[in-house]
Image (spheres, rainbow, N blue to C red):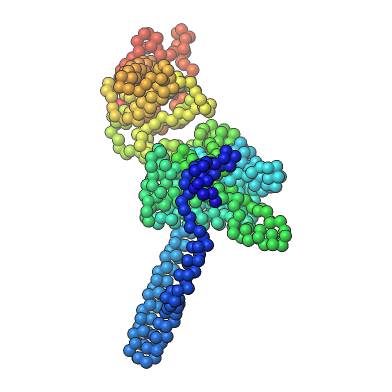
Amino acid sequence: MGSLQDLSSGPSPSEPVNGGRKYAIPHVPDLDSRRREALKRFRSPLRRLGIFIKRFTPLILVLGLGVLLVLNAAVLNAFLLALNFVWQLAFGILITLVQFVAIFWFMSRSRVERIRPEDPKVITFDNYWGQANLKALVRQWLGLLSDRETFIRMGGRYINGLLLYGEPGTGKTMLAKAMAGEAGVAFISMEGSGFRNMFWGVDTLKMMWFVRKARKMARRYGAAIAYIDEIDAVGASRGGVMGGKGGPGMGGMGGAGMFGMGGSGALTRLLYEMDGLGVRSFTERMRAKAAKLFGRKPPERNWHVLFMGSTNRPDVLDPALVRPGRFDQLIQVNPPDKAGRREIVQGYLATIRHDDSVDVEAIVADTAKSTPAQIMAALTKDAVRIALFDRRSLVTQKDIEQAFLQQWMGIENPIEEMAPDQRRQIAVHEAGHAVAQHYLLPDQRIVHLTIVARAQSLGFMLPLDQVEMYSYPLRRIVADIMVGMAGHVATRIVFGEEWTGAYSDFQQARAHLRHLQSLGFFGPPVMEPGPETAARIEKMLADFWRDLEGRVETLLRAHCGTLIALADSLLKRSSLSQSEVLAILNPAPKAVDEGTGDAVPPVAEAAAGNGHAPACSELELVASA
Ligand SMILES: Nc1ncnc2c1ncn2[C@@H]1O[C@H](COP(=O)(O)OP(=O)(O)OP(=O)(O)O)[C@@H](O)[C@H]1O
Ligand SMILES: [Mg+2]
């Protein structure tokens, strides 16, 4: 040790002292002299007496008490009473503790679904129809899950987690189950919200319990898929959905303490578990030690837990959860394309009794963007119910169409004895939509036109795309706005005044207008927001709205006869199918004028040809007369 003197003279450049820094070292007494002093203190007679008393006091007390008990019955009695009290107290505490532990143990157990490879309820890709690309993608990981050796020898690292996201009903949960079945590994699944609990800490226990079960199954079957459904319930960002601060209770939604909703504890534990997947468990460590003792190579782990999760809201998940190393692969599950839908429709049709009227291609064409869950429900639940309550044992195409209509628009809820003028107004409103739709959007077809109330609407016109659209020109949005306007414009030109009932049309048209503006339809969408810009935009949109309304009015006046004919037909029959609507909108070849041999145009066209479109109010609604 260098002295102060040495230090003040400064270190030589080749020998840095104290890491190269210069400072004074405080005086440290010699260690030997300190030890000597301590020994001296220990050997003093007073000290020795103190040690003796300390060591033997309990013995002396017990002996004294024993003598007292033997000599005095009252003391003995009091002693027994005290002993009884202490025993009862200890027993009470023990029972409370046992109850507490039992409650926590019970609460940490959750409802999980377990599917073992030998279970009869195992599903495979044979039951998972459509989604060919998705299956091809996950098949790669499945192949590696059941045969990891070559992959690991090549230096590959198996993924820890696979996250499925997409719209509800696209088949995420079913895919996870089918993956386990296909790979012949175990499957254990738990609902994200199942980890929540009113007591703080129980969510962590539940996650530990879940992972322990998954590991146990993996050890038994070589691999296991640990699936957390609706993982956003447990894995929502700890910083809050919008980046706001959340407490530890609900993962971004606040609520800490003993009675917090307990969400982020489970998340933290999940993060830890996914990180520590490669860490050896206690048993593995013991086995490795035993192997080392006998000079053998520690046994290699031959099982793997693949975490899987699914969510409709990947945007709210904690970034730590979706970083590589945890949920390494994010897979979007979309509604199936046409070929996929065909496979799904055929698959479910094979499970129900139906007649020859059922047209697979028509169903596939009508169900663009439908999810497998919707197709399954319409075919196997609603269509069968409709047929059964109509006293038929076979499902028809009509039942299936009804089933899809119920799904999209709600169940029919006809209003009995509606006043004729109100019924007439609804018919004209819907006919207005249909006429505009027919002329403005020829790439769609009207599959249903009705004035029977369903859910929120008093009537509706349902168009579907002729060809599946994934992108489209902006003019189509303009046409959509005009079709939306056509309902109230028809009412105005037939009845001479506006009616209620166009609220949702307006709402949609407004949304379309804003959409158009954000897509640059009115010029580059680069204006800085501010009161002046907002006023300019509002004026521009209002002018555009008025212009479109004017065009819709011209169109409807030009096809006034068709409009009235359609409204008439609706008043008579309440609902019109695709072919019935088309029969009015595209009438059969025009009648021929006997005198000239020319085709006789419909009334509206004839009037327009004369340069005079008739006011719709001049034409009569026959059915209502
Ligand atoms: N590819 C498919 N083939 C056959 N049936 C399917 C397919 N995908 C989904 N289904 C059907 O749809 C139902 C719902 O699917 P699933 O529960 O997997 O949807 P999900 O995407 O997990 O929905 P959510 O996001 O609401 O949890 C399944 O029970 C099954 O009957
Ligand atoms: Mg699901």
Q: Where does the C terminus fall, quadrant-wise? A: top left
* Front position in the image: 467 or 194: 194
Residue 190 seen in render:
yes
Give coordinates of residue 347: x percent, y percent: 59, 42
Q: Residue most toward the bottom?
A: 71
Residue beneath the point at 30% across and 37% down: 417
* Front position in the image: 294 or 98: 294
* Front position in the image: 89 or 617: 89
Placement of 556 over or under 25, stated as above or below: above
Residue beneath the point at 51% across and 25% down: 471
Give coordinates of residue 135: x percent, y percent: 61, 40
90 vs 9, left or right, is: left
Placement of 11 over or under 547, stated as above or below: below
Residue beneath the point at 28% across and 33% down: 419
* Front position in the image: 161 or 45: 45
Give coordinates of residue 237: x percent, y percent: 44, 42
Q: Residue most toward the left?
A: 497
Residue beneath the point at 42% across and 52% down: 262
Residue 386 seen in render:
no
Give coordinates of residue 582: x percent, y percent: 46, 25
What number of labels is visible?
Answer: 0
Please tell me in which quadrant of the rendered image residue 246 appears.
top left
